[in-house]
Image (cartoon, helix red, strand yellow):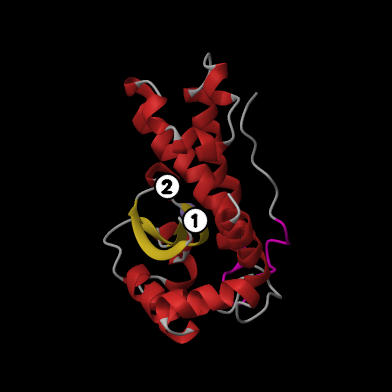
Amino acid sequence: MAFELLDLPYDYKALEPHIDERTMRIHHDKHHAGYVNKLNAVLEGHPELAGRSIEDLLRGIDEVPAEMRQAVINNGGGHANHSLFWEIMSGDGESEPEGELAEAIKKEFSSFEKFKEVFSEKAGSVFGSGWVFLTIADGKLECKRQSFQNSPYMNGKTPILGLDVWEHAYYLKYQNERAKYIEAFWNIVNWGKVGEKFKDASSD
Ligand code: MN
């Protein structure tokens, strides 16, 4: 069984003007597709690995044979990270978290505004290509930077929100102004979906 690239859960232009259609097309159809294709190529002949969910594959990264491990980290991480990214954005999401997630964010970061500051600061300070995630582990929320396509699952954490700060994610529209892209991201977070992910991860 091979890993599959799902369609975006909305139109390519649904996130305009914050993320432009052309960036979304290239990012999903070329970059994300590339990670999926390479992951499947690496796992060919290893049905015991290719048959796992992407989350399980990354959680159990130490069980992947050493000679394939880095390729699985790069491409499997790339697949998991982008799948999350598409899911937690929306052209008509709620502007703020609600319910239990809102309470947990307040408890950990003191306020939603403060959380956004911490997350944005981390996104702005990723050196080179990488991501920032809001993760949960043992009921605790954390903002965490990751280089390249390293996945929080490899560290036993579950990502519930993620922002891609590789230049391919924003360069066509924002060029070197990463801070503007980060600011724009807050307009398109699908907090309902993040709340669902929080709930699922909390009941694990
Ligand atoms: Mn990307």
Residue interval drawn in magenta:
9-21
Residue type, mark 1 in image: Pro
Residue 129 falls within the magenta-colored stretch: no
Q: Return the residue at label 2.
A: 151
Crowd class of label 2 (few under 14; some 14 to 19; many from 20; radius 10 Å): many
Asked whether the viewer can see residue 8, the reply is: yes
Q: In which quarter of the image is residue 103?
A: bottom right
Residue type, mark 2 in image: Ser
Nearer the observer, 95 or 203: 203
Return the x and y of residue 17 as percentages of the image width and height: 61, 77
Q: How much space separates mark 1 and mark 2, taking CA atoms?
A: 8 Å
Q: Return the residue at label 1.
A: 159
Marks 1 and 2 close (CB-CB < 8 Å): yes
Mark 1 vs mark 2: which is more N-terminal? 2
Q: Is mark 2 on a helix, strand or loop?
A: loop
Instruction: Give the total of numbered labels.
Output: 2
